[in-house]
Image (spheres, coloured by chain):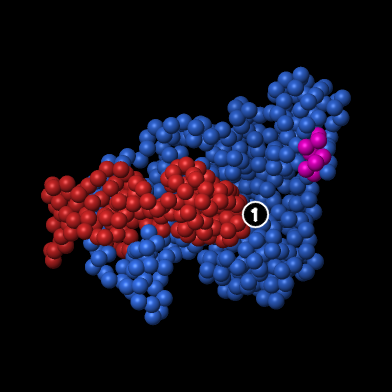
Amino acid sequence: MIYDVNIDGADYRLELVREKAGWKCRLNGREVALDAVLTRANVLSIVIGGAAYEVKREATPLDLHFWVGSARYAAEVRDPRSLRSRRQAAGAADGIRKLVAPMPGKVVRLLVQEKAAVQAGEGVVVIEAMKMQNELKSPKKGVVQKILAAPGAAVNAGDVLAIVE
Amino acid sequence: MFKKILIANRGEIAVRVMRACRELGIPSVAVYSEVDRASLHVRHADEAYFIGPAAATESYLNIEKILQVARRGGADAIHPGYGFLSENARFARACQQAGIKFIGPTAEAMELLGSKTRARQAMERAGVPLVPGSARGLEFAEAAGVAKEVGYPIMLKAAAGGGGKGMRMVRAEEELGSAFETARSEAEHAFGDGELYIEKLIENPRHIEMQVLADEHGHTVWLGERECSVQRRHQKVLEESPSPIVDAEMRRRMGEAAVKVAQAGGYTNAGTVEFLVDANKNFYFLEVNTRLQVEHPVTEMVTGLDLVHLQIRIAAGEPLPFRQQEVQLRGHAMECRIYAEDPDNNFFPSPGKITLLLIPGGPGIRRDSGMYEGWSVPLEYDPLLAKLIGYGSDRRQTIMRLRRALHEYFVGGIKTNISLFRRILKNPEFMAGKLDTGFLDRLLASPETDPVKSEHPDIAAIAAGVFAVLEQATPTRNGSADAQTQPAKNGASGWKQAGRVESLQ
């Protein structure tokens, strides 16, 4: 398998083959003597040339992080052959973007109406959790095509609140 | 001894009290709100009863409902934990009238110690050191004279006050007039009582408190101090015992003052006397917390006593099983309060599902927790998830053990303040024990000098690929976040499910 991996903004090309005895791994063309064992769900033990690492995976509906020891890395993984990956890569710069609730909470109020033009970073919806209010901002410049949040409604992490195009 | 104890609380403290009940062979009764059915305290109890909606005013603060459950379940005592109804004199009185023992002080003691000016007058009579100032309300005409006597800067405080309302700092005499007017009108609006008194301002004090224990037969002992100066917005974050600056002689003087305070207030059961300590190690009475404190484990570690066992035995009428001279302090203990909040985003609360929990262990580590993997932290309550307590033969060993334990500790799916403790425990000022209540604000305002090094992005990249390969090998996508948060419904097609999951991302 070939993956394009982005870690904290830097791109890596990773070639991985799982074999009977272990792994065949090339990172950016360089061979790596990888020994990896899944110790429990989301926890990987990696040994490379005697150096041992525990890696935790933290996946939320919004993002993906890997923790190596106590350091956290934001990650994106793409399989260059997958249709969805290609679509996502193309859509990242323009096209439709969703505004998603980062935490469970309650919609307090809407700051714009449908069809309104917004700047990147402009507030769209205010939600409240643990007695604090948080303004959710537009991920891009564009037009608010649809608002799916109603004031007073309870939302879960990952719920789509608005669509900006 | 009691036949059955109801715990009128939730979270880690409810679990803590239930553990003590089980150790004493007493069945425990949990109460829970709508959003707490799956919470850990319900799993630890022998009996559990639903008491109402998520809003605390309709559940954990509902006196009638809780007493009704106690009667129905046959509980003859109630432990209130901390927060909620723990310092509510009306609740203590209602328990007494219902013939149920409230595990804590009497309603009368709570009321006396709850009023700032009444407590101040009682402490003055008992000869307890107070922050210099006036023990009673003042007219403006007298205020200037009193202020001059104690010396600027001073604090104007509302007698009925709390929460910073009706409180003004005054640095010089010419500011007094307008500050007095605004503080008085603020106090009148907030409490319906404009009475003000004056206290000398103690700049950058330490916050040090003394644990006391009093039985119902007139015996009161002190159990050593806790240094609680590491605070953010008046909220304690880390506590330790002993304090880096308190020596045996000062400890004895503070302990004796605390016992005087408790006795002057007619206090029984476990309580905490808070003091402000200035740069010259003068200590002044601040207030009494008439409950078991969040940070009680540090005292348990250095005294070897179980405070909850003792609370229950005292409430059951037993005399204290030891005398002051038998209390011995040994070693050093420190507690980190693990909150569901994001230290990288202005400590914004972070409720949600805990997708991965790795728990530290090993020598000198105690963990009092209310969370488990797979549990969703509700958004309605206090964000305290757990307390990590380290114990060692001295302060340095305790700090190193906690650093090690924080390295092992992992809470995934929500944000926690674990990284903040890594920062505090490495700070040179903290290591040197140079603390005051402004310490944490200064630390947070300064740039991070020694951040966790991100030296293994290549390992993260490899791990990302390995997880992706392993995931493809398991057709049910076991272990992926999508599968965990949205389990396939019975009978739904896996392809349909996968399609939905893809379209959501």
Residue B449 drawn above or below residue B30: above
Q: Give the extent of the magenta segment.
A: B184-191
How many labels were placed on the picture?
1
Q: Residue at x 81, y 30 (%)?
A: B181
Residue B497 drawn above or below residue B382: below
Residue A77 vs residue B316, the one in the foreground: A77
Image coordinates of residue B183 in percent, x first then y, are: 77, 33
Q: Is residue B97 magenta?
A: no
Q: Which residue is mark 1?
A: B83
Q: Given the current orientation, which residue lies at the most extreme bottom position?
A: B491
Q: Amino acid at mark 1?
A: Gly
Q: Given the current orientation, which residue lies at the most extreme front position?
A: A115
Image position of A32 (left or right of B385): left
Image coordinates of residue B307 in percent, x first then y, are: 59, 56
Image coordinates of residue B131 in percent, x first then y, are: 72, 32
The N terminus of chain B is located in which quarter?
Answer: bottom right
Query: In the structure shown, which secondary structural element does the residue marked by tag 1 occupy?
Result: loop
Q: Colour of chain A?
A: red
Image coordinates of residue B227 in percent, x first then y, are: 56, 40
Residue B205 drawn above or below residue B105: above
Quadrant of the rendered image containing residue B361: bottom left
Whether residue B434 is visible here, answered yes or no, is yes
